[in-house]
Image (cartoon, rainbow, N blue to C red):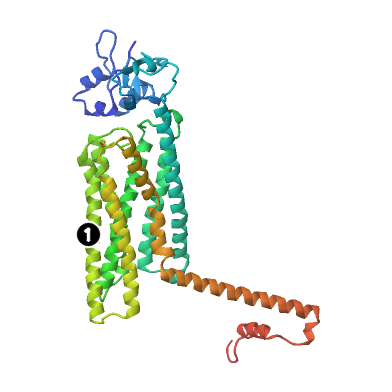
């Protein structure tokens, strides 16, 4: 009976010859290779056939995918401070029971079905997940409302607010993809805390990182736009609109393509969230750091220009205050996000225990509420937006009051036989507005 030896798909494609592929993949009882021409489709087919035991979480260890005949070992949880190991065999019927049993191999009491530390860890991760889910939900509500306000109010349509909307959208996509990623990761309780080796999981990770890159690239677009607006006396905003789109949405595509290619070739593990190779993560870190540094340089130049124009009285007071508020909001965001990225992106890998839990909680709490902060500064605290909303509100109240008064007077006229009294002022007003003037057809 033929059996698989459990090689990965990448080993199929990177093998040196068809003979080597056959030896690695199919082997008879006498260890003689079969004369089969193996195509890429067959590689994938045989690989799927080889994996008889799917990876799963047994509430103590994560067990990876395995082929029939494989013997897999897993160390005891680190918090038990033991060097024991637990083994399982992969058979035609699936995984065997662990041997030796966890309580013997890991040296904890037979009656303890699960150490308290495991329950504590599960409670912590569940609490963190609920916390950042609430944060992203709040951010989504504010971001979607901000996009609706800037899109529906015509007086707010301009290049600056177009860039604001794109920044809001990048945070909206980021929050949505976080929820999609969690749905993929935690769709099966057996895989809780395990690494999911599916394409959908890796794709969700790539898109999540793309949206994070887009956050910083659109912040750079905000800084560049403000710099050009303040420094250039003749500045065509619509002419540069396509360049903002390329910078905001296009540059992250190039960066993420390089990162994904490097991950696939050199670190194709788990859900691509591992950070074993530092140089691969620098493909993401370096562009973000450059975005932050360039943005800070833009704001230093903006500050210098504003001070110079104020001294020469080359700029009206209202215009200066408008630019100052916009620069203040943008500088606050860049400083806040830049400090957050520098602090948390370089988290030492060896941090563990209580320090890691506190650090991870703060990082996720801040990351999940970034969209809320952006919507607050660029929309809800924006004086121009507030004035337009107040103007619309006053206009709606006045229109509602006129209609209410008109209905009330019409009702009183019908009750008192008002048809003999003649038209009221409001009736004349509406009639005059709808009656054409003399000499006009």
The residue that mark 1 highlights is 294
SS at mark 1? helix
Outermost residue toward the bottom?
A: 439
Look at the image and tell me in which quarter the N terminus lies.
top left
Task: Look at the picture and state if 245 lies above or below 153.
Answer: above
Query: Of residues 346 and 109, which is closer to you in this image?
Result: 109
Q: Is residue 403 left or right of residue 73?
A: right
Task: Count neighbours of disc 1 (C-alpha within 10 A) and say few if under 14, some if 14 to 19, many if 20 or more.
Answer: some
Q: Is residue 221 left or right of residue 142?
A: left
Image spot of residue 240 (x, y percent): 29, 66
Which quadrant holds residue 181?
Answer: top left
Query: Of residues 136 and 27, which is closer to you in this image?
Result: 136
Image spot of residue 17 (x, y percent): 19, 23
Task: Look at the picture and state if 323 lies above or below 270.
Answer: below
Task: Look at the picture and state if 10 lies above or below 154.
Answer: above
Task: Look at the picture and state if 333 lies above or below 1.
Answer: below
Which residue is at 35% across, 78% downward? 318
């Amino acid at each position: 009976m033929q059996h698989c030896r459990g090689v990965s798909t990448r080993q199929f494609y990177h093998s040196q010859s068809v003979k080597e592929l056959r030896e690695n993949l199919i082997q008879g009882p006498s260890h003689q290779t079969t004369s089969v021409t193996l195509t890429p489709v067959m590689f994938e087919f045989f690989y799927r056939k080889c994996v008889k035991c799917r990876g799963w979480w047994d509430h103590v260890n994560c067990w990876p995918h395995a082929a029939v005949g494989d013997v897999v070992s897993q160390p005891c949880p680190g918090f038990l401070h033991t060097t024991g190991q637990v083994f399982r065999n992969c058979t035609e019927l699936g995984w065997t029971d662990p041997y030796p049993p966890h309580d013997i191999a890991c040296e904890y009491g037979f009656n303890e079905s699960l150490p308290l530390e495991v329950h504590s860890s599960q409670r912590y991760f569940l609490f963190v997940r609920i916390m950042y889910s609430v944060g992203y939900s709040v951010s989504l509500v504010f971001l979607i409302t901000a996009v609706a306000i800037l899109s529906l109010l015509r007086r707010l349509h301009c290049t600056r607010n177009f860039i604001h909307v794109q920044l809001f959208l990048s945070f909206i996509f980021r929050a949505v993809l976080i929820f999609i990623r969690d749905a993929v990761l935690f769709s099966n309780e057996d895989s809780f805390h395990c690494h999911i080796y599916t394409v959908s999981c890796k794709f969700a990770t790539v898109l999540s990182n793309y949206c994070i890159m887009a956050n910083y690239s659109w912040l750079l677009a905000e800084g560049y736009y403000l710099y050009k607006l303040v420094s250039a006396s003749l500045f065509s905003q619509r002419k540069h609109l396509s360049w903002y789109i390329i910078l905001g949405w296009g540059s992250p595509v190039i960066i993420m393509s390089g990162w994904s290619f490097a991950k696939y070739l050199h670190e194709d593990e788990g859900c691509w969230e591992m950070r074993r190779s530092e140089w691969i993560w620098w493909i993401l870190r370096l562009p973000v750091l450059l975005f932050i540094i360039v943005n800070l340089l833009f704001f230093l130049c903006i500050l210098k220009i504003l001070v110079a124009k104020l001294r020469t009285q080359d700029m009206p007071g209202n215009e200066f205050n408008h630019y100052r508020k916009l620069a203040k909001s943008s500088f606050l965001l860049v400083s806040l996000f830049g400090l957050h990225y520098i602090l948390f992106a370089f988290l030492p890998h060896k941090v563990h225990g209580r320090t890691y839990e506190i650090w991870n909680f703060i990082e996720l709490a801040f990351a999940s509420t970034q969209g809320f902060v952006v919507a607050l500064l660029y929309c809800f605290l924006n004086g121009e937006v507030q004035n337009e909303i107040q103007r619309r509100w006053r206009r709606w109240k006045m229109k509602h009051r006129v209609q209410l008064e008109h209905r009330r007077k019409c009702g009183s006229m019908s009750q008192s036989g008002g048809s003999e009294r003649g038209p009221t002022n409001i009736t004349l007003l509406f009639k005059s507005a709808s009656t054409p003037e003399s000499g006009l057809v």
